[in-house]
Amino acid sequence: MIMPRMPILLVEDNPDDEALTRRALMRNRIANPLVVAHDGIEALDYLFATGRYADRDFRIQPQIILLDLKLPRLDGLEVLKRIRMDDRTRLLPVAVLSTSLEDSDVQTSYRLGANSYIRKPVDFEQFIEAVRQLGMYWLVLNVPPDSGLKG
């Protein structure tokens, strides 16, 4: 039986950055379905199968969450905090994708449990390469904690 690809959750409110991410995923032939949440509340609704996602199968969680920090309604750091506070989502890989150059954003992201912090490159070719590397590591090489592999 072939297992379906787990989704990628992109939490991004900027339509240009969303389009850029979609193009970079396509260009790198990353076939995982992409779910986009446009603010922090929508992201949490998706992850916890509440609100407009109440009918979603909670057991199918994203293989990785690509999280912007500057979001409406609930910022990315608060989303990250809530993901890490819940046993059901605590181990989900979260890569922060942000244009922020603030060292405090980097430090706080890691302190709250981010697995990676990537500054969004302005140049499209650099962004394609960053997404390629991100996809190669998180979607191909990384072994998630609930993979069933025994050591």
Image (spheres, helix red, strand yellow):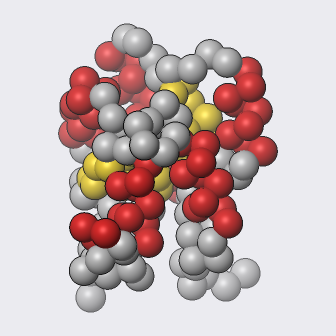
Quadrant in the rendering for residue 15: top left
Query: From where the camera sits, is residue 67 visible?
Result: no
**Residue 54 point in image, percent of width and height:** 29, 77
Camera-nearest residue between 80 and 41: 41
Where residue 105 sits: x, y (%)?
67, 29
Q: Is residue 22 left or right of residue 127?
A: left
- Viewer can see residue 78: yes
Left or right of 38, for residue 131: right
Q: Residue at x 44, y 48 (%)?
A: 40
Q: How many marks?
A: 0
Percent of width and height locating residue 79: 54, 51
Q: Which residue lies at the image location 67% right of the left edge and 18% below the top edge?
A: 102
Q: Quadrant of the C terminus?
A: bottom right
Q: Is residue 50 above or below residue 26?
A: below
- The residue depicted at 68 percent of the width and 40 percent of the height is 109
Image check: 22 left or right of 133?
Answer: left
| Residue ranking furthest to the bottom | 1
Q: Residue at x 36, y 38 (%)?
A: 12
55 over 32 or under it: above or below: below
Q: To which quarter of the image does residue 93 belong?
A: bottom right
Q: Quadrant of residue 106?
A: top right
- How far across and how far down the image is residue 21, in percent? 30, 34
Q: Is residue 53 above or below residue 128?
A: below
Which of the pair 141/17 is nearer the observer?
A: 17
Image quarter where the N terminus lies is bottom left
- Among all residues in the image, which is located at the extreme top? 123
